[in-house]
Image (tube, helix red, strand yellow):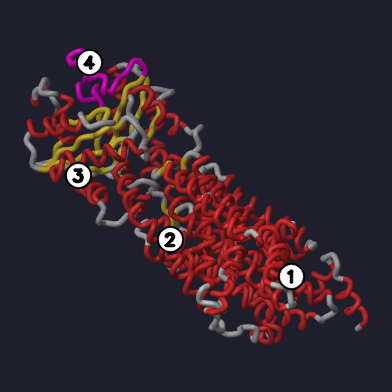
Amino acid sequence: MKRFTQWMIRHRVLVIILGLLLLIPSYLGMNATKVKYDILYYLPQDLDTVKGQGLLIDEFGKGAFSLGITQGLTEQQQKALEDKISGIEHVDSVIGYASLTNGILPDEIIPEEYRKIFRNGDARLFAVFFDSSSSSEETMNAVNALRKAAGEQCMVAGLSAIVTDTKQIVEDQEFTYVAIAVALCCIVLMITMESFLLPFIFLICIGISILWNMGTNYFLGEISYITKAVAAVLQLGVTLDYSIFLWHAYNGQKKNGLEPDEAMAMAVHETFAAIAGSSLTTIAGFISICFMSFTLGRDLGIVMSKGVVLGVLGTLTILPCMIRLMDTAISKTAHKALLPNVGGISRFIARHYVVLCIIFVVLVFPGFYGYNHLNVYYDMSSVMPDFLPSVKANKELQETFDVSTTHLILADASVSQSDIVDMTNEMKQVDGITTVVCLDSILGKSIPESILPRDILNKVKTDKYQLILLNSAYIISSDEVNQQIDTLESILKRYDPQGMLIGEAPCTKDLIACTDHDFTVVSMISIIAIFVIIMFVLKSISLPVILVAVIETAIAVNLAIPYYRNTTLVFVAPILISTIQLGATVDYAILMTTRYLQARRNGRDANESIIQAVSLSAQSILVSGIGFFAATIGVGIYSDIDIISSMCSLISRGALCSVGVVLFLLPAVLRLLDKVIIHTTIGMNAAKERKASK
């Protein structure tokens, strides 16, 4: 490898040009990668709710659907609007009072209760079905076309409208996310590094790696909007360390008297092992979330694992060449690092390690209690900004028609008209169900379906299935709606054992069950994987337990804060944050512990080893933690998308929590358990001999 690094440094301009040329396919791949904006898309494909959505498309040509609300239109105007909307590309059908009756059935023979389903004073309600899924480009384009065609006459509510507005916000803000992260990181690096130019070189090289990563997402086919929004920021935060490692190694080699080219070649060779070991725990954290049955975790995990690998590659190829190319300019912009020396805390820790251990124990109980009793939400629309058209429409839908969500039933076409009427009558009595709509319930048992034209009948009935709409006053993911779904399914199965209840609320109910299981599985996988890595890196049985316990305490404190502040988090936050924080910040603990073991192996006593470990590692840990904090806190404050905002805020606070416990609590625990450590760690002979001689 040394021979290759020497060649690379000699041909640095060529290496930089090759790295920049790779940005061309990266840019093309990034633009060609599809983005999914509906998180329910990531549910396991074997669920009945997911299968039902597929059948809805296959049998009826209907995928996503939205609810439209108009004000002050006459029957003729409403019919004209519904006809106009029916002609929009990718709109499969429109189901409303005007479009269903088509002027054939007079008001007198339609029961008043069914007329009220679609009309409340001047307000009128209708459903628009699309021929594609909720998060497809076709559906989002159709929603925008619908809004344009209807103008101010119509408001569009429902999941497809929310997804469309989410896409618009993310596209409007995602460049700003990166700009904020880069600006704040740049400020931190200018304060903590020895040159004003160096931070820009670091960030350019990391930016190249990020673009490589985003471009190679093309081979995945598609990624979620959450991954697209946070991947660049996270990659910046978790790979910034590697650039700092390389720079310090380069300076160290130059101080040893080597020429710049030779010093850089040696620095790359020396840094490779450190970066490879450091990146393993981070990659393990991201890989662990790939085991979620809710495949959003796999989406983010693959992209971020790949990003860490490409970040390492960029650090070991592009960065050394850039530093050597700009060496003179870096020297001219040199300044004294403005970060104060924090090594002085080492003696305080050595003197008060017992008190600090007591603080550690005290933190454990309230931390893990809050961590295990977090309040989470699953309804993304409930936390969207109030100014969005879809949010306003959902509010209007709830206030005017008492509808918070809509369920769909796919019943077998062979179920008789009489049974369908009886079933829907039972469902009307279920708490929270405001309306039940299907042709058989509207026509009743006495009016035959044959009275209707075939084109109208085909909207809600095929040779295999018939479609029933149920409006619910209960909010998605609430205990009330979940109980309602259970009751509706029990009624449905009595009349049609193969019938399916689908829609956003049933899918969300399945989502709750999936993520409850995922939290346990992913946490165990990440802890075991990182435990094994630490065991081999530090050659110890006791140290993996200590280090994982310390970082898990930092995670618990981080996630307990929302509990004690009575803040509700998005459902994926506890899973993702616990694994990301563990994988990305356990490096701080490994660095501190490595310094401690080196001192003990060199024959120093426990107190001296703690003082040396803290003195040598405090600056690096602080710079790394503040950099990670800076990369994410700005996005957390700025973003209007709560899932992005809360994740970045939690990650930024988690970085500081990990810095705090590693700088203060970990050394205290190492000092307290010194005897255990030296007898359960390979290569501690010097420490054992010193202890035996006393």
Give percent across and percent down for residue 96.
Answer: 19, 31
- Of the residues under marks 3 and 1, which one precedes in the sequence? 3
> Residue at coordinates 36% horizontally, 22% vertically from top-left?
59
Magenta segment includes 444: yes
Helix, strand or loop at disc 1?
Answer: helix
Give percent across and percent down for residue 505.
Answer: 37, 41
Q: Residues within 10 Å of mark 3 (few under 14, many from 20)?
A: many
Classify residue 103 by image quadrant: top left
Q: Amino acid at mark 4?
A: Arg
- Of the residues under marks 4 and 1, which one precedes in the sequence? 4
One can see residue 552 in this view: no
Which mark is nearer the camera, 4 or 1?
A: 1
One can see residue 68 in this view: yes
The residue that disc 1 covers is 594
- Measured Cα–Cα span from mark 2 to mark 1: 34 Å
The residue that disc 4 covers is 454
Q: Is residue 274 above or below residue 507?
A: below
Helix, strand or loop at disc 2?
Answer: helix
- Measured Cα–Cα span from mark 3 to mark 1: 61 Å
Q: Are marks 4 and 3 in contact (CB under 8 Å)?
A: no
- Measured Cα–Cα span from mark 4 to mark 1: 77 Å
The residue that disc 3 covers is 155
The residue that disc 2 covers is 178
Magenta part of the chain: 438-464
Which mark is nearer the camera, 2 or 1?
A: 2
